[in-house]
């Protein structure tokens, strides 16, 4: 087969199966020229196979590149997400709430983070559980969502492995229904599921015997549900919350109105709180807190990428809008 | 006739709950307590109903040889959790086998799917400009501003950023969301009242 | 979930499975849709199965089945059992029968939502939106700015209401302020998802490959 015959065959591209293939076909003449100029001396060598990327792959390249760059950025040391003044105040509020509990105080912990946002608050949540245990509080853990229950089961197992016995920790299980279940807890107390000496004591005292409710919030059940359903029925039960960033704007007004006595909701605040607890955590037992904090290098790199994309996308529109507004104002 | 019975039951259930919140009455309290427990049980029943329907549907699809791999995946997922969880002597969600399945499969799957949202949201944000350019541009610019304010920059610039970030969170953002919360609560309350009183029949 | 894997063979297998499903989902980034679809269907089964498990073991058995089978002093639970059973097998029953428990569920949930929205959100937030009399100058300014933002946002909710040019202008301003607020929320959403993505990458690099400490 001669080179010119090869070139002729390649000038008639195959019928495109998709738009992507049709878009690729105009490249065929270029390849012919390259072949002709580059391979004039060696006509018998087969053409260099050229990798064709499918449309799905091409569409995913930016996202894949981002994941790879984030992985590389994970090795950047020494970056810290600084806590602002209000983050520091939020951390102090939560610390004060925990430090103000007497030894043996029963604390109701609602673990209802969802699996999509729990990694963001896992560090602060475990810090809070360790701090409460170190302070001598007795925990009753309940969940109102399936994902929250999955997380609660794992956290309870972790605390039990660290030595939290049935006199310090009771599992109140899962309650279905969302808001009606919250009302059931507020009205009927901890219910018949839980067993053990701590459960018996809490059952006798009712939900009013709890000194604090700590809500680990998620997309379905969070501080807002507690404020709306539990607080009107049990107004003397103080409610503190740890929430992921995406819930923060929705929950901030409840902190501002005083319906929540403490709220840790930003990543810098969560990191600051974890470091504070780590400094005073117990050496062993359920008050231990030695978790690895989230990878700040990768987070900061991701933030920079997001800022660049958002500004590049919106900048043109906003500039055009500002220009036309300026022209209208002048005319 | 069917619609009026359902509407009447909807209204009755809602009104019992509301009146019990407003008035302390032992008889009403007892009725509201029973209704509350019934709601919790019905919600659990709805969860079981969902699983049952999924099993029936996908067993049927397997029998008809439709999408066998997909149906097998669904049934495998259900079986991996239900079988060890409901086995005699099992402690349910706390059983080691169930915890293992959750840690090895459920949690990583949810996390992996939702983690993809970060790059995909950025792509979608850029595409949103084609539909509503001005509104989307404002949303994107505000998002960028929030992220800039959270950047860990040292020195006086960083200090100014953290102070500004705190103020922006506590004053304008909180004020917007207070307005949203009040508006949504009022609108939701009106809609709920309309449904309970039967003047909105679309819920049936 | 980071740190939830046991030690030993079970933990190693769990880690590898978690890696496998993570990479299956992320194969979407290289154009592989089938693995993502199978992963999503597996997830649907797992999530539905888990909900059914905890609904049966932690709600229906202790609160309904056990009291009925162990004692006879709960006649109201028989009614509950009947209604729950109707809902569970509702696919095979006449719609008018299934409508009964469904209507009760809808009505009760709406009642709680309405009551909670008014007593827990509407009234306290309206009160909190006001500027306190004893506020210092800084707080008063912040409060005034807050009111100046909250009121237009609230007015933007009034659809279909007759409003003059002033009210329309304020409502339009509220709409733009709301968009700004939604943008801020979008920024926080990106941060949440970024933290999740970084956690997954840390799991792959740290727990699986052992490259991160």
Image: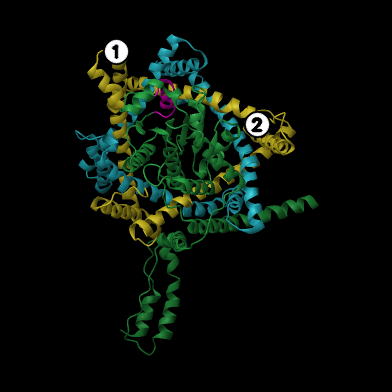
Chain colours: A green, B cyan, C yellow
Q: Is the magenta stretch mostly helix, strand or loop?
A: helix
Residue A197 x %, y %: 32, 27
In the rendered image, which quarter is residue A195 located in?
top left
Q: Which residue lies furthest to the right in this view?
A: A331
At a point 65% along the width and 31% down the height, the residue shown is: C129
- Front-most of B34 and B62? B34
The magenta segment is: A177-190
Q: What element carries label 1?
A: helix
Q: Do labels 2 and 1 share a chain?
A: yes
In this orientation, does residue A250 appear? no
- Front-most of B47 and A47? B47
Vertical order, B73 against C140 (above or below):
below
Relative to residue B191, is residue B135 drawn left or right?
Answer: right
Vertical order, B158 against B37 (above or below):
below
At a point 40% along the width and 45% down the height, the residue shown is: A288
The chain letter under disc 1 is C
Screen quadrant of the C terminus of chain C: bottom left
- Front-most of B31 and A62? B31
The chain letter under disc 2 is C
In the rendered image, which quarter is residue B10 located in?
top left
Q: Residue furthest left?
A: B88
User: Which one is earlier in the sequence, the residue at label 2 or at label 1?
Assistant: 1
Q: Name the residue under label 1.
A: C75
Q: Callout 1 environment at 10 Å: few (<14), some (14 to 19), or many (20+)?
A: few
Q: Name the residue under label 2.
A: C129
Q: Is residue A183 magenta?
A: yes
> Where residue A288 is drawn, which disc sits there?
none
């Amino acid at each position: 087969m001669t080179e010119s015959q090869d070139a002729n065959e390649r000038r008639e591209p195959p019928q495109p199966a998709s738009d992507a293939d049709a878009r690729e076909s105009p490249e065929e003449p270029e390849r012919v020229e390259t072949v002709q100029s580059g391979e004039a001396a060696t006509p018998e060598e087969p053409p260099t196979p050229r990798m064709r990327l499918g449309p799905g792959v091409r569409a995913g390249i930016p996202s894949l590149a981002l994941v790879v760059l984030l992985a590389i950025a994970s090795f950047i040391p020494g970056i810290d997400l600084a806590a602002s003044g209000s983050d520091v105040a939020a951390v102090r509020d939560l610390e004060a709430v925990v430090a103000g509990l007497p030894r043996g105080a029963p604390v109701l912990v609602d673990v209802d983070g969802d699996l999509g946002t729990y990694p963001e608050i896992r560090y602060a949540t475990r810090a809070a559980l360790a701090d409460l245990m170190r302070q001598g509080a007795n925990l009753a853990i309940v969940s109102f969502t399936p994902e929250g229950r999955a997380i609660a089961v794992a956290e309870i197992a972790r605390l039990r492995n660290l030595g939290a016995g049935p006199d310090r920790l009771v599992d109140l299980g899962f309650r279905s229904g969302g808001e009606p279940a919250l009302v059931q807890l507020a009205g009927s107390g901890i219910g018949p599921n839980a067993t053990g000496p701590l459960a018996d004591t809490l059952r006798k005292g009712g939900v009013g015997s709890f000194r604090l409710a700590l809500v680990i919030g998620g997309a379905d059940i969070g501080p807002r549900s507690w404020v709306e359903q539990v607080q009107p029925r049990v107004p003397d039960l103080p409610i503190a919350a740890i929430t992921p960033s995406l819930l923060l704007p929705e929950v901030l007004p409840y902190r501002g109105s005083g319906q929540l006595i403490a709220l840790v909701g930003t990543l810098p605040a969560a990191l600051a709180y974890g470091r504070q607890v780590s400094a005073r955590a117990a050496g062993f037992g359920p008050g231990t807190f030695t978790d690895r904090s989230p990878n700040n290098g990768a987070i900061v790199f991701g933030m920079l990428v997001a800022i660049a994309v958002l500004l590049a996308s919106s900048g043109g529109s906003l500039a055009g809008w500002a220009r036309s507004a300026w022209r209208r104002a002048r005319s | 006739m069917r619609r009026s019975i359902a509407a009447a039951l909807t209204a009755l259930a809602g009104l019992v709950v509301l009146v019990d919140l407003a008035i302390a009455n032992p008889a009403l309290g007892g009725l509201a307590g029973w209704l509350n427990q019934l709601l919790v049980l019905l919600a659990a029943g709805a969860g079981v109903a969902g699983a049952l329907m999924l099993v029936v549907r996908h067993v049927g699809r397997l029998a008809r040889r439709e999408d066998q791999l997909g149906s097998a995946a669904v049934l495998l997922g259900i079986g991996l959790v239900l079988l060890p969880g409901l086995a005699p002597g099992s402690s349910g969600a706390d059983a080691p086998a169930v915890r293992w399945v959750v840690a090895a499969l459920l949690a990583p799957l949810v996390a992996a799917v939702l983690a993809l949202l970060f790059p995909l949201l950025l792509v979608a944000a850029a595409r949103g400009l084609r539909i509503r350019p001005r509104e989307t541009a404002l949303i994107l610019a505000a998002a960028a501003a929030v992220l800039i304010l959270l950047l860990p920059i040292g020195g006086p610039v960083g200090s100014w950023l953290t102070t500004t970030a705190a103020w922006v969170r506590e004053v304008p953002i909180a004020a917007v969301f207070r307005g949203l919360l009040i508006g949504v609560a009022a609108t939701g309350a009106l809609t709920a009242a309309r449904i309970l009183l039967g003047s909105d029949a679309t819920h049936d | 979930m980071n740190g939830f894997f046991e030690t030993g063979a079970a933990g190693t297998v769990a880690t590898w499975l978690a890696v496998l499903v993570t990479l299956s989902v992320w194969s979407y980034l290289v154009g592989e849709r089938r693995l993502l679809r199978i992963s999503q269907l597996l997830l649907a089964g797992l999530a539905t199965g888990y909900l059914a498990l905890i609904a049966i073991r932690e709600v229906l058995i202790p609160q309904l089945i056990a009291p009925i089978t162990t004692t006879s002093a709960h006649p109201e639970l028989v009614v509950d059992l009947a209604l729950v059973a109707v809902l569970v097998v509702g696919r095979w029953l006449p719609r008018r029968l299934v409508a009964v428990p469904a209507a009760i569920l809808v009505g009760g949930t709406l009642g709680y939502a309405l009551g909670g929205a008014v007593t827990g959100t509407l009234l306290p937030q309206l009160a909190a939106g006001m500027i306190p009399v004893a506020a210092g100058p800084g707080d008063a300014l912040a409060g005034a700015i807050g009111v100046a933002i909250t009121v237009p946002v609230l007015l933007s909710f009034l659809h279909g209401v007759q409003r003059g040019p002033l009210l329309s202008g304020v409502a339009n301003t509220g709409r733009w302020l709301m968009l700004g607020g939604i943008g801020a929320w979008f920024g926080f959403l990106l941060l949440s998802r970024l933290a999740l993505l970084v956690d997954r990458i840390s799991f792959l690099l740290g727990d699986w490959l052992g490259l991160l400490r």
